[in-house]
Image (spheres, rainbow, N blue to C red):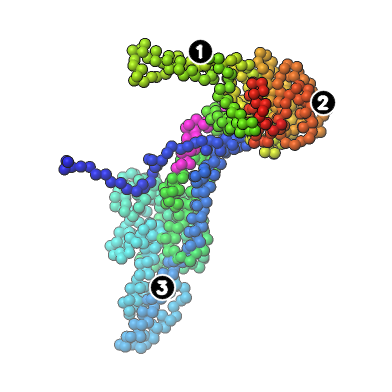
Amino acid sequence: MSAHHRSSRYGRYTGGPDPLAPPVDLAEALDAIAEDVMAGYSPRHALQEFLRRGGRDREGLDDLAGRVQQRRRDLLSRHRLDGTLSEVRKLLDTAVLEERKQLARDAMMDNTDRAFREMQLQNLPSSTAAAVNELASYDWQSSTAREAYERIKDLLGREVLDQRFAGMKQALENATDEDREAVRGMLRDLNELLDKHRRGEDTDEDFQKFMSQHGSVFPENPESVEELIDALAQRAAAAQRFLQSMSQEQRDELMRLSAQAFGSPELMAQLDQLDSSLRALRPGEDWTGSERFEGQEGLGLGDGTGVLQDVAELDELAEQLSQSANGSRLDDLDLDALARQLGQNAVVSARALADIERSMQDSGYLRRGADGDLRLSPQAMRRLGKSLLRDTAKQLSGRQGRRDTRVAGAAGDQTGSSREWQFGDAEPWDVTRTLTNAIRRTMADGGDPSRGLRLGPGDIEVAETEARTQAAVALLVDVSFSMAAEGRWVPMKRTALALHQLVSTRFRGDRLQLITFGRYAQSMDIGDLTALPALREQGTNLHHGLLLANRFFRRHPSMQHVLLVVTDGEPTAHLLSDGESLFSWPPDPETIRVTVAELDRLGRAGTQATFFRLGDDPGLARFVQKMVRRIDGRIVAPEPGDLGAAVVGEYLRAHFHGTYDDIDWGS
């Protein structure tokens, strides 16, 4: 073996896109979005709803937003704001106690001096800030007491700095006078840089020089003066909100105590100048807000400011997760903030949702229309139609009689002959002859078939089938508001989409016309019908729908005419000679007369008609019964969930003349 070898080291995955994650499965998202679109939502709204709900095994935006709000509540319910005041009080009590002990032990002290000192300690103000300020010039006899008092000034200095610069409290622990002077120098340089920036006189060299000298103070590692200002302003605004969240008494105490920070009034003057500059440079930050803290865990000034920064970050995440702003996209979600607040699992969920949002458009399932809004693309419609047709076939084969529908081969019985494939053919391939053609072509081209075959369109032969009558099919669907109100809106659309898929893929020689009828009737393509919202419009104008169906059939005189009518109410409107629609409830006799007359014309032309009666309206039942007797039609009364199978089954029955008579259609 070679003396040199490579070794591999493996560690825990620490963030970023998972390289082993499977590609996003859009099937569940598309099905859910399509269901909402068919219920009347816009595709954009439907996509947002799916992202909010999430999938079967995936958190949605609402789940993430709920976790954000819970963390916010936890922060506020866990803490209180008097941590610094309590710590200062403890140090003050320690200093006073130790001084009294020293006075009691010191036998050499003049009794008058001792009495004066004891009286001074006894009569300290109850206010912590006033007591600390009153003892500023006190000549401590106890070194332990003096040390405790000096720690008050040191603590206050570190806390007020920690409010503006995260980590200063720890960094300046046990700091020397030189360390404190370095901080004051940093503040002078910072205020000078910000003042130049406000006047527009700073340069990139000024920023780089400042960072080279003081960069260790800024863990955010800003790369420009704007990023530096952003970080400082967010922290300073959080400090202001922390103070605003205190009671007036607590706030007054801290303001008076701040004068003792490091025993240096200059420090507070520099910090005041810094706050003033940041307010001017970032007025959009929340400088006046407040929160209500209700917990028992005391917070110091620095830690409390950090909690308020967390609260602000959580509020920003909540806004991003709501996706309420115009043009909002999940790609804009701050994943670093999400990881800080909720952990990497939340980031994984957010990335998956963003991938779905992006992939729905990149894959072509959603497309922007002429109006700029999203729409289901033809590709999405085909995929949905395929899924719905598959579900319909299962329903057909599962009905009483249990006949296998075999829609893939429904073009007719095979004759035993074959012919060259042509575009649009739906007949099954003749595999033997197709492979023989490919072998012959490969050998003629000098190739070796044993090394593999590549099929070409010219190799394919399809099995010839017996001739089948082509059909012109008019599917009339009721779009009066009762269809939506009674839960029949989505089943109606699913039915139209399944039938459209069947005709466009299995029976390409047929022609399908989708016609909606409410107050008026109109012909629609499948995309418009799928996206059609429910309108609160009265009127069931079957007369107008039959007029459009008759016009469609006249364009295809040589085809078999098949009329399929889906409705849940008897006719209540008809078209007048001037093109207006007359609505009347109860139905006007003229409405019934003209509707029957138009149906009679269809019957005389040999149209095969089937009425799909939804619901239990007695008036509709009587009307439909009379209609089918006049034209020798059929009635099917399915449940809404069975409507698709019923309509497709009737379409197939019209083609194959009784093949499906033994199936129970619910009539």
| Residue placed under numbered mark 3 in the picture | 90
Q: Is residue 339 left or right of residue 189?
A: right
Quarter of the rendering occupied by the C terminus: top right
Q: CA distance from mark 1 to mark 3?
A: 99 Å
Q: Residues within 10 Å of mark 1 (few under 14, many from 20)?
A: few
340 or 402: nearer the viewer: 402
Helix, strand or loop at label 2? It is helix
Q: CA distance from mark 1 to mark 2?
A: 55 Å
Give, as a three-letter code, the residue at label 3: Lys
Q: CA distance from mark 3 to mark 2?
A: 95 Å
| Residue placed under numbered mark 1 in the picture | 419
| Residue placed under numbered mark 2 in the picture | 590
* The label number, if any, that marks residue 536 in the structure image: none
Helix, strand or loop at label 3? It is helix
180 or 112: nearer the viewer: 180
612 drawn magenta: no
- The residue segment tinted magenta is 351-371
Give, as a three-letter code, the residue at label 2: Glu
Where on the picture, by quarter, is residue 120?
A: bottom left
User: Measured from the top left, where is residue 587 in percent x and y?
Assistant: 81, 31
- Residue, x 77% and y 28% (percent of image)? 625
